[in-house]
Every structure is written in structure tokens, then in C-alpha cells.
Image (spheres, rainbow, N blue to C red):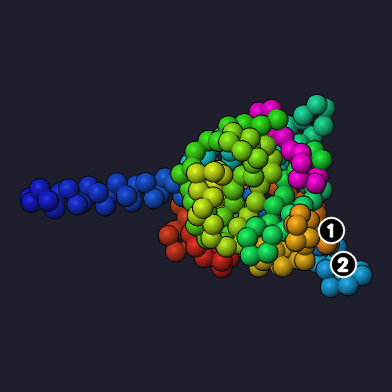
Amino acid sequence: MNPFYIAITLVVINVQMAFCGNFTVTDEAWFEVEVKDLDGEGDDYKGRFTIALFGETAPITVLNFKTICQGSKKSQGKALQYKNSPIHRVVPDFVIQMGDVTIGDGTGGASIYGNVFNDENFILSHRSPGWVSMANHGEDTNGSQFFILLNKARWLDGKHVVFGKVIRGMDVVKTIGEVPSNSSTAVPHKKITILNCGLTDLDKKYDLDEKHLDSEEDL
């Protein structure tokens, strides 16, 4: 067999293996959210979105995230849980940010490992709308806060740890992203709350197909 053909075949196999490993979904986390008085007093908006978690690519980050989704760890006697916490930051055409489980205004947060934990890796990219990444205030300062992209933002690669992708309910995320906010602080003018959250019961892990990586359609 032609050595060149063998080399090309091995490259293709390695790329396919890397692709499958990086985008293997180990868990799914769902969030039920509410925007108070979105279209007028008493006209509340409610929706639900689901995030696929890549627990083989970012196991430390995913464990922290899904544990707080379940609310099973405590910090200083207080449960760490996303339930009833706010979506405190809306930057039009960029991100919605949430997960401050201690203070609620974006200045707090904590992890199951302590107040902060280190950046795990930067394997996954901020490649398109719907990708989910850890918020921080510098290197190795991950806690509980995270953001969901409304647009591609590859300039964040190498600065924030990407660990998930919205696979259902991207229309809900986009609706939240259109809520008016303060142009200086990005604090939304409407109260936005995570009413409930949890993990989906998966029978087994699965790989996210390439066609779904940049898709905003429900899986």
C-alpha cells in the first residue's frame, strides 16, 4: 500500500477520534426561566432551554456545573444552587450571563471546590451562538457564573473555559438576549430568574454531530 495513502488515512482517523472525544455529551442540564413583565405588567415570559455538557473534555468544570444544578453541595452552610438565582447580565448580540449563586448581582459566586477553581483547559471554542462558557475575572478564577453566547466570539478562546452547548430552547436564550439592559452595566431592566433547573436522565453518552455544533435548531 502507498505510504502516502496510509499517512492520510491515519490523519483522517485521528481527526475523527478527536472530534468524537471533544464533543461527547455526558450530561444534559435543563433550565426553566422567567422574565417578569416582559411585554407589560403581569405579562410574564417563561421558557426552558437545555445544555449539552461535555464531561469528557472538561470533567472538572462539568462536575462543578451539574452539581450546582442539582444544589447538592454547600458553602458556609448555604446550598450552592442555580435555582432561584438571577440572570444578571444581558449584553445585546453578545452574551447572557448568570450563575451568581451567593450575591446575585454578578459580584459573587462559588464552586464546589472552594470560592474559585483553576481553568481546566481551552479545548472547545466560542465558535457560534449557544455555546456555554465559564465567566471569570481573570486567570484561574472560575466559580459558578457562566454565560451563553448570542454570537460567535472566538476572541474569548484561551481566556474562558467552554464546556457546553445549548441543544434545545435557543429561541428562549435569544428572547432573554433581547431584554433591554443598562448600556454601561448590562443589568437587565426586567427581572430574569432561573425558576428551576436539573439534569436530564440520559441512557448513555452520545456524540454531538458536526452539523449540530453551530446549529440553533432543537436537537
Type of residue at label 2?
Asp
Q: In this view, does 198 lie above or below 114?
A: below
Residue 188 in percent (x, y) is at 79, 59
Residue 169 visible in the displayed image: no
Q: Is mark 1 on a helix, strand or loop?
A: loop
Q: Which of 12 and 153 is in front in this view?
A: 153
* Label of residue 191 in the image: 1
Whether residue 178 is visible here, answered yes or no, is yes
Residue in the picture at 77% in, 30% down: 74
Residue that extends furthest to the front in the rendered view of this protein: 184
* Residue furthest right as drawn: 41
Check residue 107 for magenta coloring: yes
Query: Going 83% across and 68% down the picture, which residue do you hit?
Result: 38
Q: What residue type is labelled 1?
A: Lys
Magenta stretch bounds: 104-114
Marks 1 & 2, CB-CB < 8 Å contact: yes
Percent position of residue 73, x then y: 73, 32
Magenta stretch contains residue 25? no
